[in-house]
Image (spheres, grey):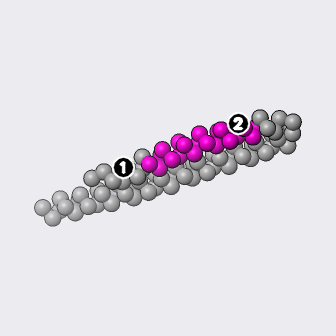
Amino acid sequence: MLGLLLALSLGSGYAIMGAGIGAGLVALGAGLGIGRIGGSAMESIARQPEAGGQIQTAMIIASALIEGVALFGVVVCLLISFID
């Protein structure tokens, strides 16, 4: 009986640890993606300044979509950690 309780508590700990690692990976991926979008946008604006407004609009929309997916991923990781 004690072994079963110990296994259940270890499984819960692994779920929480996995959810934390997953949330960290989601945040890392989103940060890298948005950074790459920003860097590419700045390069393209430097090459063609007259298209700056259109590039900036596309950059903001793409960044917002990435943030939405990242938020969804973090919420899923937190929900996984609360499953017993």
Instruction: Please tell me whether residue 61 belongs to the stretch shown in magenta.
Output: yes
Amino acid type of the residue that numbered disc 2 sits on in the rendered structure: Ala
Q: Which residues are magenta?
A: 55-75
Q: CA distance from mark 1 to mark 2?
A: 33 Å
Amino acid type of the residue that numbered disc 1 sits on in the rendered structure: Ile
In which quadrant will I find the N terminus? Answer: bottom left
Mark 1 falls on what kind of element? helix
Instruction: Please tell me whether residue 45 belongs to the stretch shown in magenta.
Output: no
In the picture, measured across the screen, residue 83 lies left or right of residue 5, that is right
Along the viewing direction, whichever of 35 and 58 lies nearer the viewer: 58
The x, y position of residue 6, in whole percent, is: 22, 63
Q: Which residue is mark 2?
A: 58
The x, y position of residue 3, in whole percent, is: 17, 62
The x, y position of residue 60, in whole percent, is: 68, 42
The x, y position of residue 74, in whole percent, is: 47, 50
Mark number, residue 80: 1
How would you rate the neighbour count of disc 2 (Cα within 10 Å): few for under 14, some for 14-19, many for 20 or more?
some
In the picture, measured across the screen, residue 69 lies left or right of residue 50, that is left
Q: In terms of secondary structure, what is the magenta stretch mainly?
A: helix
